[in-house]
Amino acid sequence: MPTSNSLAGRTIIMSGGSRGIGLAIAVRAARDGANVALIAKTDTPDPRLPGTIHSAAAEIEAAGGHALPILGDIRDDDTVAKAVAQTVERFGGIDIVVNNASAITLQNIGELPAKRYDLMLDINARGTFALTSLALPHLLESTNPHVLTLSPPLNMDRRWLRYHAPYTISKYAMTMLTLGVAESQRDAGVAANCLWPRTLIATAAVQNLLGGEASMTGSRTPEIVADAAYQILIRSSRDCTGNTFVDDDVLREAGVTDFSQYRFGPGTDDDLAIDIFL
């Protein structure tokens, strides 16, 4: 599959990215000299959530990229519109949209407060819709435009609905919107793909919400998702669209055989915790 072999000079606009998977994707792109605009809410450090837009920008710059940290909420249309405009003004266009921001609550119907349901749908589904929609005119002017959404394959096994239907709806909505872009923009050459991890990833969400240290020891590092994202984003947009990728499948196709480098804790692949939706 044709690739450009580099993201040098390419401009990424990303929702979230102060920490975790989003930051890892940004730093990997920055190693090529990419431009990265981040729309995120964390302005000051939080003991439970290390990293701010400012520390993320510093990491991107240190890796060799150019950062544009934008303080704002992906749920606010004016914020997103201004972020897109700022990115274009600063870097001259947009080549890549990464829908990374996501909220998670695994409570089910009857337990989940409506406010938390709205939060998940607004950040996950509506945020993907808003950022992609507003960036699309600029993507259409790029020579290799990509949309990459961190959302899972559409797995209709009803156990996901049994245990956490609201969260499942929000993540599958991200996937369906992205696949919709892939089909509607196929002739225009705008790629739109989804990416999901095979295993739990060592992030603040896993630490704080999904089992603490026990889950962390069965996790891989965010760099596995970042390396997979990189492999997708250097591909030709006309040849790679409409896919729901899983991180280690992408890397195996790229020739990676040693996945021990991505282990967060001690152990073997047999000890890894498989992520939900797979």
Image (tube, rainbow, N blue to C red):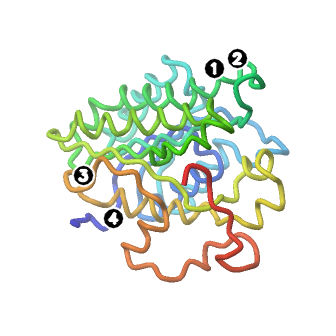
Q: How crowded is mark 3: few (under 14 residues within 10 Å), some or many (20 or more)?
A: many
Separation of disc 3 and disc 2 at Cα?
A: 39 Å
Separation of disc 3 and disc 4 at Cα?
A: 14 Å
Residue under label 3, please give it. 237
Amino acid at dot 4: Ser
Q: Earlier in the sequence, mark 3 or mark 4?
A: 4
Q: In which quarter of the image is residue 267?
A: bottom right
Residue 118: mark in rendering = 1
Separation of disc 1 and disc 3 at Cα?
A: 33 Å
Amino acid at dot 1: Asp
Q: Residues within 10 Å of mark 2 (few under 14, many from 20)?
A: few
Q: Earlier in the sequence, mark 1 or mark 4?
A: 4
Tell me whether circle 1 and circle 2 mark residues in contact (CB < 8 Å): yes
Q: Is mark 3 on a helix, strand or loop?
A: loop
Residue under label 2, please give it. 114
174 shown above or below 204 = above
Tell me the mark number nearer the camera, choosing from 3 and 2: 2
Separation of disc 2 and disc 4 at Cα?
A: 44 Å
Q: How crowded is mark 1: few (under 14 residues within 10 Å), some or many (20 or more)?
A: few
Q: Is residue 253 left or right of residue 111?
A: left
Q: In this view, does 177 lie to the left or right of 208?
A: left
Q: What element carries label 4?
A: loop
Residue under label 4, please give it. 6
Which percent across, then down, holds residue 93?
31, 38
Q: Residue at x 46, y 47 (%)?
A: 36
